[in-house]
Image (spheres, rainbow, N blue to C red):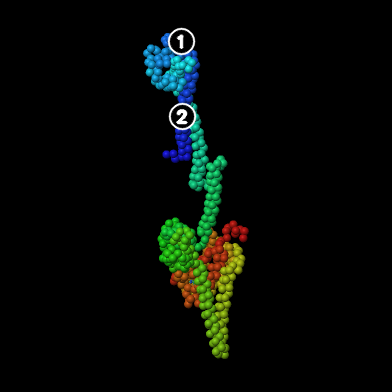
Amino acid sequence: MFRSIRSRIAVSYTFLIVLAMTAITIYLSDLVRRTYLADLRTQLTAEARLVGEALRQPLTQVEPGEALDALARHYADLLNTRVTIIGVDGTVLGESHEDRTQMDNHLYRPEVQQALSTGQGNSIRLSRTAGYEMMYVAIPVKVEEQVVGLLRLALAVRQIEANVAHLRLTVVAAMLVTTLLAVLLAALIADRTAQPLHLLTDTVGRVARGDLNARLLPLTRDEVGMLTHAFNQMADRLREMISTLAEEQSRLAAVLEHMADGVLITDGEGGVRLINPAAARILNTSREAALGRSFAQATRHHRLIELWQQCREQGEEQIEPVEVDRRGPFLQVIVTPLRDAEPRACLVVLQDLTQVRRLETVRRDFISNISHELRTPLASLKALVETLRDGALEDRPAAQRFLDQMETEVDALTQMVQELLELSRIESGQVPFRLATVAVAEVVLPAVERLQAQAERAGLQLTVDLPADLPSILADAERIQQVVTNLLHNAIKFTPSGGEVTISAKASKDEVVISVRDTGVGIPADALGRIFERFYKVDRARAREGTGLGLAIAKHIVQGHAGRIWAESVEGRGSTFHSALPRVKPENVERA
Ligand code: ADP
């Protein structure tokens, strides 16, 4: 009922005050009445004694009758009371207010009896003569220790009660005013007590809604002041903690956001609770699609799911390399139980080792390729040397032929070593490109000139198609010539007699693309992505004389110019190699 502290204090205070005040009022009004009656009685008694003194003589001398009635009336007027003079036998001898003759014997009136036995009597009772309540005081009148009569004074209680009621009213009024003031004070105190609590509630509510800067002013030095102080301290501490947490969280989020490894956290039920962009990319899903789903739905890979399940069941870390699919990423999967967070919760880390494995493969292939490439010429050199030693040295023309062959092999080996050296120097950035503004014709025509004769010998038609208004390129002319020569050389090499080789160029907004097209054997689709690798040859038997390094070198040169190189081909129909190089912008041309 009284939910608020304010009403609780106010109501209980008011109740207490009203109760106390009512009790005090009842008690006081009773006290006032009693005191008033006692005072009146004393006063009446004193008056009675005084009048009794004056009646000693008349009582002994005067006959009962008019004279005593007149005397009674006289004193009654003086004292404003009723006066009754009673004989020793109880007969009324004189009376101020009533008809004496009608009055009965008064000897057995309680006040008369009391006066006779104790020397003074009083009572409050219904007057049989007057018909209403009166206060009586009686005393004996004595002459020389002889009782000669009794004097009785009486006052109507009605009149007394009126006086008492007036007094009572005053007391009640005073109490009412006091009660009212006390209740007002109670309300004020209740209000004062509850107000800081309301303020505190408001402020706590604001903090709860996220306003961490909400504070209270400590206005008082009492318990509420202490509470306010404690609250402010708590809010300060809370803000500090939350900002530290937020900072830590954002740092962690940034790490997760940018780390190359995929990170996934699953909860006790197996739902994905966290997935970073790397994990989403590796698993070919999106954060939105994965969050809240089960791990199995999010990853859709049986080996991953098995590892995760094992970790959940055994509570032990699982580490295993997993190939997502034949062409997909190669992963090192680490599943760790997160016992501290939640039972059966797991942390899954996916390290993408595709690149590492690819490099590993490249390195292994490189070694095997280089040994393979070296083995053939070395074997034929060894055979030639042995033949010479076994007697061919004596046969001079044959010896000459063998020596020529040996020279060819040595030259091939030397070229290969030189190309390798060059490739490694370009790759490691040791060869600085001397970039300058170069006309496309300047790099294309010398290469065409150099290979024209070879094309004719192979029975091929070599066509150059350069538009007149081609912009210049920013390039190291000698190096780009080397690239063009290489592409042309390959085109001639892999195009059967009667075919065509065309070299053309085209400008776009930022680049000039030089293309070499042939109508040769072409390249199978699955090899197209690999031909720029070192030592890669599509058909080892057919490309015997090459080293497989030419395109790798070409790629590195073009990339060193911030350009691109790529190939298109249909097997059996021919290939086109494109090399895009950055063009010189018109404003730069003027300066050049
Ligand atoms: P190589 O010195 O053996 O020619 P490259 O690196 O220049 O080495 O070429 C790599 C391989 O790419 C070649 O062995 C050949 O199989 C393939 N290739 C290159 N150019 C062509 C072309 N124009 N047509 C068909 N195949 C080509």
- Which residue position is annotated with label 2? 27
Instruction: Determine which of the numbered discs, if any, sits on residue 424 in the image.
Output: none
Q: Earlier in the sequence, mark 1 or mark 2?
A: 2
Q: Nearer the viewer, residue 95 or 81?
A: 95
Task: Name which residue lies at 41% across and 14% down.
Answer: 92
State the SS at label 2. Answer: helix
Type of the residue with mark 2: Tyr
From the viewer's perspective, tell me whether residue 132 is left or right of residue 35.
left
Image coordinates of residue 255 in percent, x first then y, are 53, 59
Residue mark closest to the camera, 1 vs 2 = 1
Q: Is residue 516 visible?
A: no
- For the residues labelled 1 and 2, the Cα–Cα distance comes to 50 Å
Task: Name which residue lies at 58% across and 63% down.
Answer: 474
Q: Nearer the viewer, residue 143 or 267?
A: 143
Task: Name which residue lies at 59% across and 70% down.
Answer: 425
From the viewer's perspective, tell me whether residue 574 is left or right of residue 469.
left
How many discs appear? 2
Placement of 254 over or under 4, stated as above or below: below
Placement of 199 over or under 318, stated as above or below: above
Instruction: Determine which of the numbered discs, if any, sits on residue 61 in the image.
Output: 1
Task: Name which residue lies at 54% across and 52% down.
Answer: 241
